[in-house]
């Protein structure tokens, strides 16, 4: 059959009748009169040369041809609707959309408490599904299509082909030691810094972090006494030890009193870190994606 000569709207009508089994109910759900629905059904029957539905005890019983057609419309209509969704206005108060986000524990900690509290008011039915961060390149993660966003951690604000981003938080690093460390008090020299064993935070098992890169540029190196994956766990390894930990200031200042830590300025210049929200360029015109980005921008970036 030539699709150019076929009214595809009739497939929506067909599918609605197939699901409901009632002309009156199908017409009501499509917001048209029963008469208009019946006329459209007659056109479809003529086009396909099949009755499609036979009335039995006030129920429209599908024919064999209708059952076969329904197998295809059940797959095709949702795909078409999904394809058109990018131009559909996003209504946060009523939307039940689930946003899928890949994130590390640190970026989750910085984003989610404030964001979920805000969404409870402005988008109460919206859901967040947060998945473990991946070591794969951001573009590759987003190109797979299952994710809406990736929360990234960078030390320079750079463009990435095929990916849009929003830098929503920037902060500095500090060095922490146990308050009872008799070798370090109130400040830490480069000599003391290099004399101690360090905790390396490596989410994906990296052998070096930003501190190591800075030291390497000075032809220096530190000794790693413990390597682990979590920014949130790392400071809990410092109390009653001589470990030195260089970490984001935002976390260090929150736990310093509880863990009896002293928060110090690093003896080397370490570039600030930037937390970034990434999404694929193919979703740049998606109303839901643009709304989400706008809400993060309003919440975290001072204008």
Image (cartoon, helix red, strand yellow):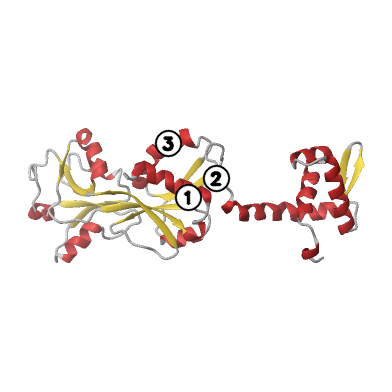
Q: How many angstroms separate mark 1 from mark 3 (CA)?
A: 16 Å
Mark 3 residue element: helix
Dot 2 crowding, Cα within 10 Å, few <14, some 14–19, many 20+? some
Residue 55, picture quadrant: top right
Q: Please provide percent x and percent y for residue 144.
A: 51, 60
**Quarter placement of the C terminus:** top left
User: Mark 1 or 2 closer to N-term?
Assistant: 2
Identify the mark nearer the N-term, 1 or 3: 3
> Given this view, does label 2 or label 3 mark the residue nearer the observer?
2
Is the Cβ of the residue at disc 1 closer than 8 Å to that at disc 2?
Answer: yes
Disc 2 target residue: 90
Identify the image quadrant of residue 22.
Answer: top right
Question: Horizontal placement of 279 versus 47: left or right?
Answer: left
Q: Quadrant of residue 47?
A: bottom right
Q: Residue at x 52, y 49 (%)?
A: 287
The residues tagged by marks 1 and 2 sit, at their Cα atoms, a distance apart of 9 Å
Residue 245: x and y, percent?
Answer: 20, 48
Label at residue 290: 1
Crowding near pointer 3: few (<14 within 10 Å), some, many (20+)? some
Nearest the eye: 81 or 74: 81
Residue 148, label in figure: none
Q: Is residue 48 above or below residue 233?
A: below
**Residue at image point 9% right, 55% down:** 190
Cα–Cα gap, marks 2 and 3: 17 Å
Residue pictured at 40% horizontal, 45% vertical: 296
- Tag 3 or tag 2, which sits nearer the N-term? 2
Residue corresponding to mark 3: 118
Residue 220 position in % (x across, y down): 14, 63
């Amino acid at each position: 059959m030539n699709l150019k000569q076929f009214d595809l709207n009739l497939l929506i009508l067909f599918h609605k009748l197939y699901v409901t089994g009632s002309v009156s109910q199908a017409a009501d759900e499509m917001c048209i009169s029963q008469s208009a629905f019946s006329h459209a059904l007659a056109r479809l029957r003529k086009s396909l040369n099949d009755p499609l539905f036979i009335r039995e005890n006030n129920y429209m019983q599908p024919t064999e041809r209708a059952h076969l057609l329904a197998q295809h419309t059940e797959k095709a209509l949702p795909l078409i609707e999904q394809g058109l969704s990018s131009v559909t206005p996003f209504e946060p108060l009523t939307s039940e959309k689930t946003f899928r986000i890949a994130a590390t524990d640190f970026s989750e900690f910085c984003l989610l408490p404030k964001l979920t509290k805000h969404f409870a008011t402005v988008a109460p039915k919206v859901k967040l599904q947060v998945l473990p961060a991946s070591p794969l390149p951001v573009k590759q993660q987003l190109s797979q299509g299952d994710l809406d966003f990736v929360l990234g951690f960078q030390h320079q604000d750079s463009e990435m082909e095929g990916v849009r981003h929003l830098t929503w938080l920037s902060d500095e690093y500090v060095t922490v030691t146990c308050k009872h460390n008799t070798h370090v008090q109130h400040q830490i020299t480069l000599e003391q810094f290099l004399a101690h064993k360090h905790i390396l935070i490596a989410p994906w098992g990296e052998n070096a972090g930003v501190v190591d890169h800075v030291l390497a540029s000075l032809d220096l190196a530190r000794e790693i006494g413990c390597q682990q994956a979590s920014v949130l766990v790392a400071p809990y390894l410092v109390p009653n030890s001589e470990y030195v930990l260089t970490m984001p200031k935002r976390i260090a200042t929150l736990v310093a009193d509880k863990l009896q830590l002293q928060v110090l300025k690093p003896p080397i210049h370490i570039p600030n870190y930037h937390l970034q929200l990434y999404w694929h360029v193919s979703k740049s015109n998606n109303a839901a994606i643009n709304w989400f980005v706008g809400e993060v921008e309003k919440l975290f970036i001072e204008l």
